[in-house]
Image: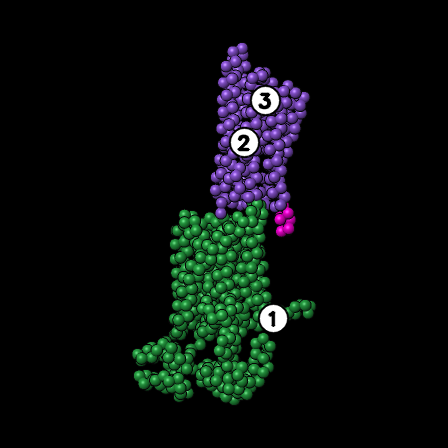
Amino acid sequence: MEIRILKKRLDIGRQFDDFLDKVSEAGLLFKTGIDAYLSDNIESFEKKIEDIVETEHDGDALRRDLEETLYVQTLIPESRGDVFELLENMDALLDRFKGALWQFNIERPQLFKESNEDFRELTSCVVEAVEAVVRSSRAFFKDISSVADHIHKVPYWETQSDKVASRLQQTIFRQEDLPLSHKMQLRDFVKHVDKIADRAEDVSDKLRIFVIKRSL
Amino acid sequence: MFLFFLSSGLFLGWSLGANDASNVFGTAVGSKMVRFRTAAICCSIFIVLGAVISGAGASHTLGKLGSVNAIAGAFIVAFSAAASVYLMTKVGYPVSTSQAIVGAIIGWNFFSGSLTNYHTLTKIVITWVACPILSAVIALILYKVLVLGIYRMKLDMFRLDSMTRYGLFIIGAFGSYSLGANNIANVMGVFVPVSPFTDISFLGLFKLTSTQQLFLIGGIAIGVGVLTYSRKVMTTVGEGIMKLSPVSALAVVSAHSLVLFLFASQGLEAFLQGHGLPTIPLVPVSSSQAIVGAVIGIGLLKRGRGIRWRVLGGIASSWAVTPIIAALVSFISLFFLQNVFEQKSYRPVAYAITSEAMARIQKQGISLKETENIIGKEFPDAEHFYSALSKSKNLKPKERDFILKSAEIDNMDITDENLETISIDPHWITQKEKNDLEKLEGRKFTHKWQLDEALSEISPNWRPSENDKKYDENLKHKLSHIYEKFRRHNN
């Protein structure tokens, strides 16, 4: 019985890795998806949506499995609540990537050339912020003392994405030939994407507390 | 009748299981690393194994309960200790069985007019203070070392979790094993000389001696105590004083085991002695005190913020109250036993400075000038004799103890009949030793020391060694067994 539990425990470490891989993967799919959309490569864009839906589905299944194992096997009793919360939050980030891409697919907003570069930069900042949270979370499980090496990057990317988002919104609203409704639609998209970086920062703030709680 | 007397031992075993055993797994259960059921089952199994395989035999107890010289008295002593431990278990405080036993023996001493050895008592009481402090210090150091090791090894969360769990499990099992081995004598030791069991052999594979069978029963009683009633105390130990993280729980149980080992290891004592280092007194320390001390140690490391002082105060006062309750219960029940049920709860030990004793005392160079009036006079018990002796002001405490020992009356007849009751056991009394005893046939002794001297004249094997404590201890138990066999029963 004991051997089985040990094996399970090694498995669960791998499962966490897999789950974080999914979050990271979703970020990359989001980035390439937006890129495809901006380059009018709709076929590739739709493929990315299919992929991200699948990734999200896998991530959900992994998360449920992990949560169940944690509780059934009463693993890491003192941090279980925190790990549970971290899992939920990371999953929420994954969902946001998928949601944003879906929104693009539903509304198919008409972007103008001048905003494309900024949009790409915004996406990149957001993905970097999430990537930093993923790395911090990995460190939280594997080597708690190295969390600090990654976590400080999250606020940096969040600030960057805020800056780009503001700039992008200014550009949008200074377009004279666009109707207000169109401007507002584009602004919503910018905010939608920028929100992901905000959420990533929230997660990193919580993670910081979890680290303090776990420090021996 | 034996079974009736055994019942109080079983009661003591049960309350020991319900209280002391909680210390071993309390922190593991409190930090939710091990489930209560798993802990209780593992703990019970290892207690039974420890009791049967390396139960320390009669040696421990006879030292502690040695003076309790009638089975009914032993019954009451065990019962009072068990009752007070049960009471404390009911309110959920970790107390120690040895404290309760010491209290109960003092109650018996008061009742029977025996003297309490204040030197030993002080030594024991001092360890009650020293043990938690030492345990706190060790826990602190262990925790620091563990944390350093964990950071160095860069363990991932789940590996650390499983390693801590295994650590808690292994140390818990080890602790249960030694708890069984050390404490079984408290529970069953008094019944060893009167056990009606015979050796049983299982298909010739292994053999259970009558003592082991007795210890098995006692071990099971402890195990049942763990399974049925230990939850409350476990909660107090594991969560009540402060919330422990799994790693600190590991440090706490390790410190607890280490302290118990330090105070109980004859090997360590021999090692220290051999290297000319000061030794640690080998006294029965309480695992409850060790564990509570260790928890406080961890709490202080975190600047005492997490410690619930109210719970701690409750525990400390329960430690003070337990021996008192045990002494009172013991005294009152002895009174009832003696006067209502007319059971003999102690064998009166008379004292007199006979001419032989006088010669022995004078040989030591002790002058009895001021106490000439007591020479030849018989005193009904130690208390009376001691107070008469105390009138002489210029006797040193050591000299007084010597006179006391020399004057103790214990009439013994070495008869053929009595000799036959001594059975040969290669681990206990050998054929050669019996032959030595046979050489004394027909002789009568008034004092124990006379028999000791007569025996040591026959063979040097009966002489106490200079530095082998274990040998001396063993010899002492052998001799008290022999006194028992040859004692003249007047009534």
Which one is closest to the eye, mark 3 or mark 1? 3
Q: Is residue B477 visible?
A: no
Query: Where B30 falls versus B399 (above or below)?
Result: above
Q: In the picture, which chain is purple?
A: A
Where does label 2 land, which residue?
A129
User: Residue shown at 50%/74% (left/top)?
Assistant: B469
Amino acid found under the numbered disc labelled 3: Gln
Q: Give residue B184's position: percent from left, percent from top.
A: 53, 65
Q: Chain of mark 1?
A: B
Q: Is residue A202 visible?
A: yes
Q: Which labelled disc corresponds to residue A103?
A: 3
Q: Is residue B84 magenta?
A: no
Residue in the picture at 62% in, 26% down: A32
Question: Which numbered disc, 1 or 2, marks the residue closer to the eye?
Answer: 2
Separation (CA) of disc 1 from disc 2: 72 Å
- Which residue is label 1 attached to? B209
Both marks 3 and 2 on one chain: yes
Label 2: chain letter:
A
The tint chain B carries is green
